[in-house]
Structures are given as C-alpha cells and as structure tokens.
Amino acid sequence: MNIISWNCNGAFRKKYKYLMEYNCEIVVIQECEDPNTVNYSEEFKTFMPNFIWVGDNKNRGLAVFSKYTLNDNLWDTGGNKYFISCKVNNEFNLLGVWCHKANSKTFPYIGQMWRYLQINKEKMRDKDILICGDFNSNKIWDRRSRWWNHSDVFNELEELNIKSLYHQYYKDEQGKETIPTLYHTKNIEKPYHVDYILASEKFCDSLLNFKIGDPKKWLEVSDHMPIFVEFKTRDLSKNYK
C-alpha cells in the first residue's frame, strides 16, 4: 500500500498529475481546493474516486482522497484547524492534518494539534492508525515557557505507541532531520522539516519505504516536498469500491 502526503501550495486541480505516476491508494493534500466546487478531470476522479474535505476557504483546505471507501469518524475537532479523521475501508484509521495558524494568538500551528490530541487521544489508543500532514512544526522551535511544544505533542503520541515514520526509517533525532520537507518561500537556502507521517505499531512494522520528494522536481509547484510511504501489501480489495 502506498500513501502520499503533500502540502500542494494551492491549485491542486492543476497539480494532481504530478502524483498520477505513483501507484498510490491514498493521498492527503494540504492547501487543497474543495473538490465539491472544483471540476477535477475524469482522469483524477477515476484515479481517486472517494474524498473528504474540510476548510473555511473553498480554495485552501485539507483533503483525503482514496481509491478505497472513506467513512468520517466525526471526531470532535474542538474548533481546531484542520483535521480529518476517517476509517479507510473499515480496516484502519487515518488522521489527515494541516496545523493552521487559525488566527489564534495562544494556540497556533502545533498548538492546534496539541488541543486536538487532548480531545481525541483516547480514541487513538490501541488503534491501527496513520497520521499524515503538515504540522508546521519542528523541535527546533520548542519554547520552555510553553506546555504544548512540538516535543510534548510527539511524546504524547509515542505514549500511544504512535511514532514518526521518518525518524524510524532514517534514525535521525527530532530537530536534527537531514532531509527537509519545506523550503520556505521556495528558497533552497531555507530548509525545514515540518511535514510528518506517524503510525501505530502494525504500520511501523510493515513499513517498506519512506521517501521525501526531490526539490529539483517539486519546487516548481510547491514549497513543500511530498512524502511517499510504502507498506507491505494490505489486502483491501474485498471491500474495494
């Protein structure tokens, strides 16, 4: 099973073709237009026939697209932005994330994830789950005066046995990542690691491959690089629609 998570930097209707060459079953897209208001091509609708989207602005929200059925878990977001929790083919849970500034002076970006986690972490306990998205966060920005730092969020997830696949695969330490996911303002001299895919134990154990897009290819369309993950085959075909 192959999954892609990508902050497309808007206009996904013009950029989805960049993903068509990859044999993926699920794509989680940040800064994505509302598919209900945009005419995606029949090619893409066939490629990814099922979706869930959330957002306040029809031009930039969060979407999960899939070849498989998606059922919204309807987990309480607490007004935090933006999160999609869904069941994929009644097989496992997927949480799509775009940690937004949300016009919050108190809990912007990773603070949104921290608040969401306080509401929903018991729902994640002992579940097969993937968490994919743009967290807009890294350990390098931790503040001692804050009780909801990047490290606090990732430590709480580790207590649920949900771990970052990048750090599992490459053995880098948090805050010392060697492969960026963001080149701020598309400037190659401003690299950061802010996008993540995390997973529960079964997914960690079945991980085959983890890649981050090459800026030589992707910077022409977004300041964020896509994340590609491949797992050992899960037979979802029986419920395929």
Image: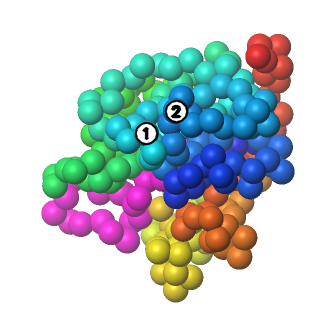
- The residue shown at (47%, 62%) is 194
- The residue shown at (33%, 30%) is 77
Disc ID at residue 58: 1
Can you identify the residue that label 2 sits on?
37
In percent of width and height, residue 228 lies at 70, 53
Secondary structure beneath label 2: loop
Q: Nearer the viewer, residue 148 or 132?
A: 132
In percent of width and height, residue 217 lies at 72, 70
State the extent of the magenta-drawn residues as a range. Answer: 131-154
Q: Quick one: quadrant of the C terminus? A: top right
For residue 47, above or below residue 169: above
Q: Is residue 113 left or right of residue 15?
A: left
Quarter occupied by residue 231: top right
Which residue type does callout 2 highlight? Thr
Which residue type does callout 1 highlight? Lys
Q: Is 133 within the magenta?
A: yes
